[in-house]
Image (tube, rainbow, N blue to C red):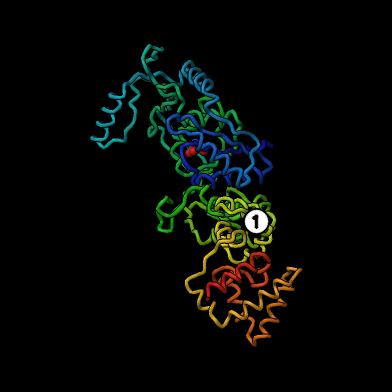
Amino acid sequence: MTTVRTRFAPSPTGMIHLGNIRTAIYAWLYARHNNGQFVLRIEDTDLERSTQAATDMILESMDWLGLNYDEGPIYQTHRLDHYREIAEQLIEKGLAYRCYCSKERIDKLREKQMINKEKPRYDSCCREKNLPTRDEPYVIRFKNPTKGIVEFIDQVQGHLSFQNTELDDLVIIRSDRYPTYNFSVVIDDNEMCITHVIRGADHINNTPRQINLFKALDATPPTFAHLPLILGNDGKLLSKRHGAVNVMQYRDEGFLPEAMINYLIRLGWSHGDQEIFSRQEMIDLFDIKDVNKAAAAFDINKLLWLNRHYIKTLDPLYVAQYLAHQMVKLNIDITDGPDLTQIVLAQRERCETMQEMAAKSRIYYEDEYAFAEDAKKHLNLEIVPVLKALREQFNNLEDWTEEKLHEIINTVAEQFGLKLGKVAQPLRVTLTGGTFSPPIDVTLKLVGKKRTLARLVKAILFIA
Ligand code: GLU
């Protein structure tokens, strides 16, 4: 049996869109499910639009999501001479030709065709002229078959067929000697022994051209699977209008890779009504044939729900790495406060993103904090003796454990004939400035003895 080989072949011409990364995930999963191989190829032949920053972003996204590749990154710009050579070979075999038509001629032709309501296409003017190289710019065009149909069974879309008369003679080498996408992609998919091409449905119309090129190269075309596009909540193609579409933005906003992958695989694929998938389950269960043909709609609330789930359930030590990243981004000195794992344990039930967790945890690392506007509701003259009593007891406490702290709050509440909440809430406002925080003993533990004592003084002064 042949080994399944898939690839992700992004063009580094901008940010990496959620649709692109879902393609990468499906191609990766399909290879892993079949014990195959996954190749990363950077299609950087569009010199004007390709940037190193975009390439770096692709590599970072793959790394963040744990989409490991068996080969690559392979850069098409390292193979330019090879594409040119193959184009020359096709000319020699009579399967391609040099075309010297000027831009003006092509523009005029298109204009005329538009006026006549015809589909703009090259009229094959140079096709049979067998023109040699001359000292003027030319392109190399593929002699697309003029008759017959191209058909294939798409693993997602089903049977597709195209008339060759609909396809014109495609430019394979541009006048700047760079190959076009349709040409280099075929050479690479062929030479890299790709068995399954999994990509966005926006490439469906390129596929018949590519199949003709495979045939011209005496190669068997791979199996194709074109994934439906992703829509926004209004049914229109997902774009910036709907919020972030850049994968890296989700990382930066504190989504965990587990949530992102889980969310994206379910966007167009399902296994019964199961929502949560471990990495191994995805690999075991995924099949490209189960991908929906219909476009899927992006739903940020579901992504947030998954993120909350993974924040709550993953190993706190692991989650703490992402917290550290977010804290550093917020310029919080994480060496001056509790261990980050403790923060994760205390905060994980109450945060949707790691960014939110970091922002809500600043008070455990910094001395400066502000009282909320309604703080005076809890911090009033009657509470001053309670705060003083707490301060005294905390000051004498050697063993700063949740248990002991809890005992002190109980004792002080009893001493003043108050319910526990009537002591805990003013103390919470004292420690954090606001009324939301983990349970009071946990909050005290996180704030630590030194800061707790200082904050009690600050609160008393605030009241006075
Ligand atoms: N470089 C193409 C893109 O980014 C790849 C398409 C393909 O997978 O063939 O759209």
Q: Is residue 448 left or right of residue 51?
A: right
Q: Residue drawn at (55%, 53%), measured in percent from left and top?
A: 330
Give whichever of 109, 221 is nearer the camera: 109
Mark count? 1
The quadrant in which residue 459 appears is bottom right
Q: Position of residue 118 (x, y in %)?
A: 28, 35
Mark 1 C-beta closer than 8 Å to ligand 1: no
Can residue 157 be seen here? The reply is no
Looking at the picture, does residue 319 appear above or below residue 377?
above
Give how far across and how far down residue 289 sits, in percent.
Answer: 57, 49
Residue 451 sits in quarter:
bottom right
Q: Is residue 171 in sight in this rendering? A: yes
Q: Name the amino acid type tagged 1.
A: Asp
Residue furthest right as drawn? 399
State the residue in front, 206 or 387: 387
User: 115 above or below 61?
Assistant: above
Front residue of 191 and 297:
297
Residue located 40% across and 53% down the image: 241
Residue located farthest toward the left when viewing the structure as drawn: 115
> Secondary structure beneath disc 1?
loop
Residue 262 x %, y %: 59, 55
Q: Position of residue 158 (x, y in %)?
A: 51, 46
Q: Residue at (53%, 40%) from the top-left corner?
A: 57
Q: Nearer the viewer, residue 387 or 213?
A: 387
Q: Tell me the quadrant of the picture where the N terminus can be found.
A: top right
Which residue is the site of mark 1?
336
Query: Around disc 1, counting alpha carbons within 10 Å, would you say few (fewer than 14), some (14 to 19), or many (20 or more)?
Result: few
